[in-house]
Amino acid sequence: MSTPVTGSGTITAERTTPLVELRKLTKVFPVRGGVLQRQVGEVRAVDGVDLEIRRGEALGLVGESGCGKTTLGRMLVRLLEPTSGTILFDEDDVTHAGPRDLRQFRQDVQIIFQDPSTSLDPRAQVGHAISEGLRIHGIGDRAERRERVGDMLELVGLKRAHAERYPHEFSGGQRQRVGIARALILRPRLVVADEPVSALDVSVQAQVLNLLKDLQTELDLTLLFIAHNLAVVEHVSDRVAVMYLGRVVELTDRDTLYRHPTHPYTQALLSAIPMPDPRNRRKRVLLQGEIPSPMDPPSGCRFHPRCPIAEEGLCDVEDPPLMDVPRDVDHEAACLLRAGPRAR
Ligand code: SF4
C-alpha cells in the first residue's frame, strides 16, 4: 500500500499509521432450529476481514444487503462481540476490552444509525438525547452542556431552540441531523455511519451527505460510511471497500474504483447506477442468480456462481485473497484473473 502524503507533499508521521486496523475479523452467528432450538448451522456474516481505516479519511463500505457490512461496523464500535480476529484502535487492542477500558473508546468512536427515530426516545426533548453522552461521561455542568448542545445543533444546520422540541416535531432529514449531533457531541475521532441516508427521501439525501462530508473535513473526523449503493458512497468517500458474502473483494481510492473497477462484482454494481448523461452510460453487467446463502458459501471464489467471466477448474477451486491489481497503486481485488500473479 502506498503512504498517504499531505497536500504539501510532506509525509505526516501521525497520518501514516492507520486509526483502525481490523485483522482477520470474523463474526459467526449460530443458526438454531427445531423444537429444542438446537444449533443446525452457522452464518459467517464477516469472514476474516483485514481492513485499515486511515486517519482523517472517509472510507466507504459497500455491498448488497446481507454481505456483512453492518455486522462489521457494529463489531468495530463494539456493539457486537467478534468471534475471532483483532480490532486495533489507535494501536490499542480493543477487541475484547471490558467496560472500564472502553470508557475512552466510547468517547472516541460513535455510530450514526440508519433510522434515528428508533433510537430517539419519543417522550424526551432532543436536547436531552443529544446531551446524554456528556452526562454519561460527566462532562460539564448543566449550563455548559446546554451551551454545547446549542452549538452542536447549529453545526448540523438546526436552531438552538430545537433542543426543546420532541422527535415527532422534526422531518426525517432533521431527525437524522439530530442523530448526527448526538454522535458528534463528544467530539469523537471515528464515526461509523451505518446507511445514514437510506431511510430518507431522495430529495434530502444529498443535503445530509453534504453535511456529513463538511463535518468530516471541519472536525478532522475519520469516517466509515456504510451503504448498499455505490452512487451514495461516491460523494463522501476517499477510498471504497466493496464487500461480498462476508469478505472485502475490492479496495482502492474512489477515483480508481469508479473509473477502473476491477472485480466483476464491483463492475456489476457500478453498471446498475443510472447515469444522467446517456453518453457516459456503462455497459450493464447482469449477474446470474441470487446472492448465495452465507450458511453455505460456494467453494473456491465465493462469487463464481454469479461471475460472468468465471473459469471452470480454477474459480470454483481456489479462494482468492485480496491481491494487488497490476499497474495500479493502492488497488487490491480478490479475483484470480484480474489481480495477483496470474492477472491478465
Ligand atoms: Fe470471477 Fe474467478 Fe475472479 Fe472470482 S476469481 S471474481 S469467479 S474471475
Image: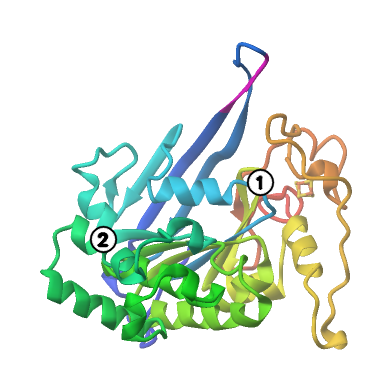
Q: Residue furthest top?
A: 36
Q: Position of residue 334 (x, y in %)?
A: 66, 50
Residue ID for mark 1: 66
Q: Which residues are magenta?
A: 30-34
Question: Which SS class for mark 1?
Answer: loop
Residue ID for mark 2: 133
Q: Amino acid at mark 2?
A: Gly
Q: Amino acid at mark 1?
A: Gly
Q: Quadrant of the C terminus?
A: bottom right
User: Is the magenta region chiefly helix, strand or loop?
Assistant: strand
Residue 101 falls in which quadrant of the image? Answer: top left
Question: Which SS class for mark 2?
Answer: helix
Alpha-carbon span between mark 1 and mark 2: 31 Å
| Label placed on residue 240 | none
**In the image, is residue 111 above or below residue 43?**
below
Whether residue 23 sits left or right of residue 267 in the image: it is left
Q: Position of residue 225 (x, y in %)?
A: 51, 65
Q: Earlier in the sequence, mark 1 or mark 2?
A: 1
Residue ID at (44%, 57%):
119
Please name whichever residue, 172 or 224, is drawn nearer the observer in this view of the structure.
Answer: 172
**In the image, is residue 294 above or below residue 87?**
above
At label 1, counting other C-alpha atoms closer than 10 Å, the crowd grade (few under 14, some 14-19, many 20 or more) is some
Q: Residue furthest left?
A: 141
Residue 61 falls in which quadrant of the image? Answer: bottom right
Please name whichever residue, 55 or 28, is drawn nearer the observer in this view of the structure.
Answer: 28
Residue ID at (20%, 80%):
147
